[in-house]
């Protein structure tokens, strides 16, 4: 980082450097995702990496500052028993999530059986990771239909989670997903997927 810069310029350059490391898959978030996946594999705990890391694996990369991982409630209990005090701490007392102390990254845990978005019962729930995880390049990730279902259900029911709808739109565009993918989705989210799919076909004017 160059000297003689003001705080705004310093923050801007720091953000650029962080983004470069992220997209090169050498940043702290990628290292934390790989570390938690290796720990879960070592403990034979079923998991699926979700959120922005799964988006990237399926074709749409965006910078994120944390790692989302899908576990069962039993899996979370086993993870905490094995890992707390050994490179991980609770984010706060009673938290589902943990913090990777080596990489300084939050690990946010999604619990199978709970509901995305507003947290209220709906046809789409967080599934058992053992049934929806697929092999990614370096760790297990949510299958594409499951990732889209959860993102749509979240954005449809929680006004503060509109980013989840934008994620689906950008994923459709980046990965050139077909409209026919609706057949693999829960009926609860099919109309929203088609709406976003149509929006993704529109190009910005030159």
Image (tube, rainbow, N blue to C red):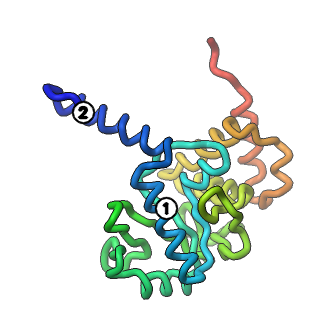
* Left or right: where 195 falls relative to 64: right
Question: In this view of the protein, which residue sits in the foreground, 193 or 13?
Answer: 13
* Left or right: where 107 falls relative to 73: left
> In the figure, 55 relative to 101: above or below?
above
Could you tell me which residue is drawn at 59 percent across and 48 percent down? Answer: 56
| Residue 134 location (% of width, % of height) | 71, 64
Mark 2 surroundings within 10 Å by alpha-carbon count, few (fewer than 14), some (14 through 19), many (20 or more): few
Q: Taking the image as drawn, is residue 48 in sight?
A: yes
Q: In which quarter of the image is residue 90?
A: bottom left
Mark 1 surroundings within 10 Å by alpha-carbon count, few (fewer than 14), some (14 through 19), many (20 or more): many
Furthest residue to the left?
A: 4
Q: Do the residues labelled 1 and 2 touch (CB within 8 Å)?
A: no
Secondary structure beneath dot 1 equals: helix
Could you tell me which residue is drawn at 82 percent across and 49 percent down? Answer: 181
Secondary structure beneath dot 2 equals: loop
* Left or right: where 1 falls relative to 45: left
Could you tell me which residue is drawn at 49 percent across and 62 percent down? Answer: 33
Could you tell me which residue is drawn at 71 percent across and 47 percent down? Answer: 192
Residue placed under numbered mark 2 in the picture: 1
Could you tell me how far apart the alpha carbons at marks 1 and 2 are, in whole angstroms?
27 Å
| Residue 175 location (% of width, % of height) | 71, 40
Furthest residue to the top?
A: 206
Q: In which quarter of the image is residue 61?
A: top right
* Left or right: where 16 falls relative to 38: left
Residue placed under numbered mark 1 in the picture: 33
* Of pointers 1 and 2, the one earlier in the residue sequence: 2
> In the figure, 33 relative to 200: above or below?
below
Q: Taking the image as drawn, is residue 196 in sight?
A: no
Question: Which image quarter holds the C terminus?
Answer: top right
Question: Which image quarter holds the N terminus?
Answer: top left
């Amino acid at each position: 980082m160059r000297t003689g810069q003001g705080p705004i310029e310093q923050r801007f350059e720091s953000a650029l450097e962080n983004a470069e490391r992220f997209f090169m898959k050498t940043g702290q978030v990628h290292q934390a995702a790989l570390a938690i996946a290796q720990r879960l594999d070592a403990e034979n705990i079923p998991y699926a990496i979700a959120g922005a890391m799964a988006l990237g694996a399926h074709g749409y990369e965006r910078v994120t500052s944390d790692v989302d991982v899908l576990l069962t409630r039993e899996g979370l209990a086993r993870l905490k028993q094995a890992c707390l005090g050994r490179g991980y701490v609770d984010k706060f007392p009673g938290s589902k999530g943990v913090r990777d102390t080596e990489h300084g990254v939050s690990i946010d845990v999604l619990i199978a059986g709970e509901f995305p978005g507003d947290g209220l019962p709906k046809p789409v729930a967080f599934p058992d990771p053992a049934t929806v995880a697929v092999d990614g390049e370096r760790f297990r990730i949510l299958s594409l239909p499951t990732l889209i279902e959860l993102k749509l259900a979240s954005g449809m029911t929680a006004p503060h989670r509109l980013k989840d709808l934008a994620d689906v739109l950008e994923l459709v565009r980046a990965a050139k997903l077909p409209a026919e993918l609706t057949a693999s989705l829960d009926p609860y989210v099919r109309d929203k997927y088609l709406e976003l799919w149509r929006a993704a076909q529109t190009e910005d004017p030159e």
